[in-house]
Amino acid sequence: MIKNRTHIILYGLVLLLLSTFTSCKNSSDKNNNTSSKIESEASLSSSTYFSTIKKRGVLNVATNYNTTNYFIYRGTPMGYHYDRVRRFAASQNLKINIIPENDIHKSFSLLKNNRVDLLAFDLTVSQKRKKIISFTDPIYQSTQVLIQRKPDNWRKISTYEKLEKKLLRNTLELAQETIYVQQNTSFESRLTNLMDEIGDTIFVKPSELSVEELIKLVNEKKIKYTVADEHVAKVNRRYYPNIDIKTPVSFPQNISWAVNKNSDSLRTVINNWQASFDNSYYSNTLYNKYFKDPRMANYIKSNYHSLTGNNISKYDSIIKINAEKIGWDWRLFASMIYQESNFSPKAKSWMGAYGLMQMMPKTMASYGIDASSSPQQQIEAGCKYILWLDKQFKDKIIDTDERKKYVLAAYNVGIAHIYDAMRLTIKYGGDPLVWDKNVSFYLRKKSQPKYYNDSVVYYGYARGEEPVNYVSEIFDRYQQYRNIIEKK
């Protein structure tokens, strides 16, 4: 919520303190290593790998971008494996950095080169793969099935038996047929083995397209066959009722996540968590949500599903125009509005903040709006306030990305509390121009008597945890938007 702009007369004092601090600060500090701390983790022993992740505070994860594993719907990052990873990371007090990657070969390279710590998607366990990666305990089992299109008039076929005769049900009938599969997947090796089993040739065509894209081509009659895991096929059958998925081409197989060969400690932690999680009510709910809930079929048809619409909200066009005014990526601004109101122009908080931008009545009045104002007027007023906040920090916090964190925090808790946190940071030897682990740390401390009673604190107690989490969650969601939603 936005606090009233009072007591800003002490801003000059903060500037003086900051000027003194920055004039004495060695310029070499600007060269601190802020790049990835993965470093040479390939050389770490398995016993130290997870402790290194804990020290880093971030779990780097590759997953598929598709209708089940990872996507964005109405501004919310979602997906079966995304949600599982998020729950696991939260249990270990870790943040997650998601790298969407649909190419299996590239994902394996990311893992091998320690660009990611975990592959969190449907990986079929095989002896060949075990030579290069380490699998976690199985998440579930699945059977590979043939995807074929039903005849055009299948709804008018009088009996089930007659329909069955028009579909391929015996894998021996795949002899001399052409099947397109996603390249570098277990589907290729399975069909190679199947050729030996049936004693004939199957023309396997590896494709750069994803499994779901190939299923769509079958539905459109552009290709005749493809192969998918059964649980994925069932989800896609909701979107494409003309496809048939009843012909198995494999026995049940274990599906797992994977870590690097030197990551036994991470695998052990995941396995221990998974043993508990998979026996929980939430685990069943999560699986049912993505693989059994018929509402998922409506999600994919929505303009606000990232796979079909590239939209975040119904207000995207207004958000984009106003984001330009404040010099922000529109996806960051959208993430902020989601955080404030979940894109509801009539949202009202228990403190009385209202609308898309959750502005307090007095602040709304100062910008000429009220509860009857349109969504566009609400967003425009919020932008004006953001511009004012940005101006207060602009002279000292030169880095625009860093300054956005201060602006967001001030928007949430009030600029006076940010000044207090900056003064505390200076007093205790931190950098008042750096948000993470500096000003954010002391803003959290403002809920403790030792700090809110300090002589450099003029505005007393603040629930500092709330604005710190506010900034973190907005930027985390912004990263999800950047992963998937186009900037234009």
Image (cartoon, rainbow, N blue to C red):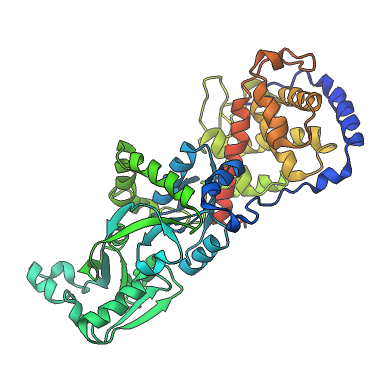
- Rendered position, 136 above or below 438: below
Q: Where is residue 482 in the image (x, y as percent from the top left)?
A: 59, 53
- Rendered position, 487 above or below 464: below
Tell me which corner region of the image, top left, top right, bottom left or bottom right, holds residue 408: top right
Q: Position of residue 353 (x, y in %)?
A: 58, 24
Q: Residue at x 71, y 40 (%)?
A: 404
Residue 304 can be seen in this image: no
- Rendered position, 49 above or below 182: above
Tell me which corner region of the image, top left, top right, bottom left or bottom right, holds residue 459: top right
Q: Residue at x 55, y 47 (%)?
A: 48
- For the N terminus, which image quadrant? top right
Q: Position of residue 441 (x, y in %)?
A: 68, 29
Q: In this view, does 188 lie to the left or right of 261?
A: left
Residue in the foreground of this view, choosing between 431 and 417: 431
Q: Where is residue 417 in the image (x, y as percent from the top left)?
A: 71, 23
Q: Residue at x 32, y 43 (%)?
A: 278
Residue 167 can be seen in this image: yes
